[in-house]
Image (cartoon, rainbow, N blue to C red):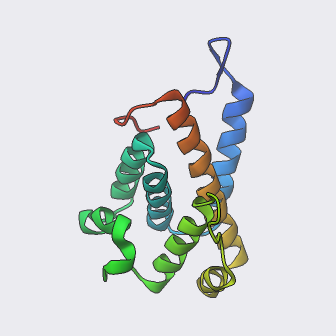
Amino acid sequence: MEARVNGKPNPDMIKGIQHLYKAIHAGGVDQRLLSLVHLRTSQINGCSPCVFASVASAKKAGETDERLHHVVAWRETPFYTDEERAALALTEAATRIQDDAPGVTDEIWDAAADHFSEEQLNAIILEIAMTNFFNRINRTIREQAGKTW
């Protein structure tokens, strides 16, 4: 989705989004982990353009095909650290907000807080929120996979 008003780029929207991403990347979280969070969120939401973009971003950051192919089944594989598992559990709990979903439980929060500083947690939470934001926009406008932004 391109930030446009009346067919012209909207600099306020673009600037706001850039500031949010700047805050995420200033949080001290490894780009590969942020890419895994982005990928898992997008898988849950069925957002094909974001799945495509997150795989491309993760590969640029040095992520392996093996790990990327198994993010969807991260609980059942030996490929992720305890830190990554805590971030992925937080990602799933924060993304799955349908009726009666337990959300982020104390157990999930405590596990994440054991591995990340407050600044890092803020960055991960903002990454989850921004990914959900773009997933919903892409699903609404029926954006197709194949683009990286």
Q: Position of residue 100 (x, y in %)?
A: 64, 65
Position of 123 compared to 40: left or right? right
Relative vertical location of residue 47 with respect to residue 75 in this rendering, above or below: above
Taking 106 as reference, is 30 left or right? left
Q: Nearer the viewer, residue 73 or 128?
A: 73
Image-based side of 67 in relation to 139, left or right? left
**In this orientation, does residue 86 appear?**
yes
**Is 111 above or below relative to 48?**
below
Image position of 146 with respect to 99: above or below = above
In the rendering, at what x and y percent does residue 120 appear? 65, 71
- Nearest the viewer among 46 and 98 is 98
Residue 9, by quadrant, is top right
Q: Residue 98: percent from the left, percent from the top? A: 61, 57
- Badge count: 0
* Residue in the foreground of this view, choosing between 129 and 54: 129
**Image quadrant occupied by the N terminus:** top right
Q: Residue shown at 37%/66% (left/top)?
A: 71
Residue 49 placement (x, y as % from top left)? 41, 40
Q: Compared with residue 143, is residue 94 higher up or lower down, i.e. above or below?
A: below
Q: Quadrant of residue 32?
A: bottom left
